[in-house]
Image (spheres, helix red, strand yellow):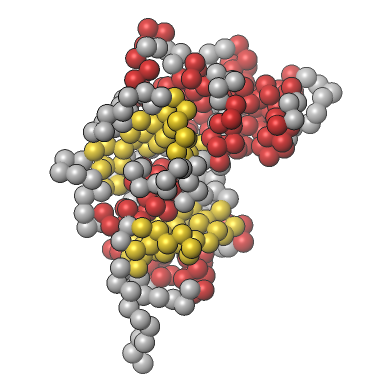
Amino acid sequence: MPDARPLSPALTLVADVGGTNTRVAFARGGVVDTASAVKFRNSEASGLPEVLARFHAAAGAPALAGASVAVAGPVHGGTGQLTNLAWSFDATSLGAALALVPARVGILNDLQAQGFALGYLAPGSETALIAAPRDAAGVQLVIGIGTGFNAAPVHPAPGGGRVVAPSECGHVTLPARTEIEMALSHHIAREYGFPGVEEALSGRGLGHIDAFLAQRSPGGLPPRDSAQIMSALTEGEPRARQAAEIFVGLLGRVAGDLALVHLPFGGIALIGGMARALAPWFAEFGFAAAFRDKGRFSTFLEAFAVDLVEDDLAALTGCARHQTGLSGHETAILP
């Protein structure tokens, strides 16, 4: 029987796959239909193909022109692998779930998607944290702090558009400098095998810092998760304040390191739930000072602006832009 579904040649599907939740929506012409966005808990599905198929079916299974998926983990050989969940998928499995040929399915790192979103975010969704002049033609940098930690540089492309490169910089060595940071680094190495940035600068990372502080003060409060720590922080609890101060100082230092690596004269965007949660304490706990704490290069770091992005659908916007770029100028570099 002929397929009687109405054709929607400009309709695409976009998804942002995190370690805890997956957001899915439809988009047209590079613009997300925010009213269609649905959030799924990953623990309630066997994998991403099931999530996408459920979303698509619930909307009446409209014909799609393509799909782009952002994954919180590396993409290699056309396969996306979540860092903090045992999910992997490729264009073939996702295409089968959506009745799409694999060539119309794009898979990219979630920070790459955030990079594609810059310049297309919802009005009022960016707050300045560090002010500095911006080079409109300069490199930009997106740093994500949420369930995990990662960053992606955004390079202007000749002839327009942009090139967004992937990385897994959340798994480089934590740059400890102070005595307590060095002790924390040793603690993380003992407990988790390697003192990676993500083991301190993420949702679970804040919990790791709190557990470290608990060990240094036996008989006090037991270790807590990030939500409990944030609640205690708002109440002014001393250990929560110390954990947050360590977190903010390390985040400033890591962001400064990444700025020196990528030279983002176009600005730095911080994204993710932990960045948003702790931003009200950045000034008090010295984020800017830690960012510029580079000895004779401290003044040089003043050239980089830092903003906080508060748009929960930014990665979906980036996926929508990436989907239009499958036949255009915007390119995700895939290993």
Query: In the image, what residue occupies the spot 75% across and 26% down?
Result: 237
Query: In the image, what residue occupies the spot 42% across and 53% down?
Result: 316
Asked which quadrant contains residue 241, the reply is top right
Residue situated in front as seen by the camera: 124 or 45: 124
Q: How far across and down, in percent of the image, does residue 35 sit?
A: 48, 63
The residue at the far front in this view is 124
**Relative to residue 121, is residue 218 drawn left or right?**
right
The residue at the far right in this view is 219
Query: In the image, what residue occupies the spot 42% across and 22% down?
Result: 256
Q: How far across and down, in percent of the image, does residue 1 sit?
A: 36, 92
Query: In the image, what residue occupies the spot 35% across and 30% down?
Result: 267
**Relative to residue 267, is residue 181 drawn left or right?**
right
The residue at the far left in this view is 159
Q: How far across and down, in percent of the image, does residue 244 sit?
A: 63, 26
Residue 140 against residue 317 in the figure, above or below: above
Residue 45, can we see it?
Answer: yes
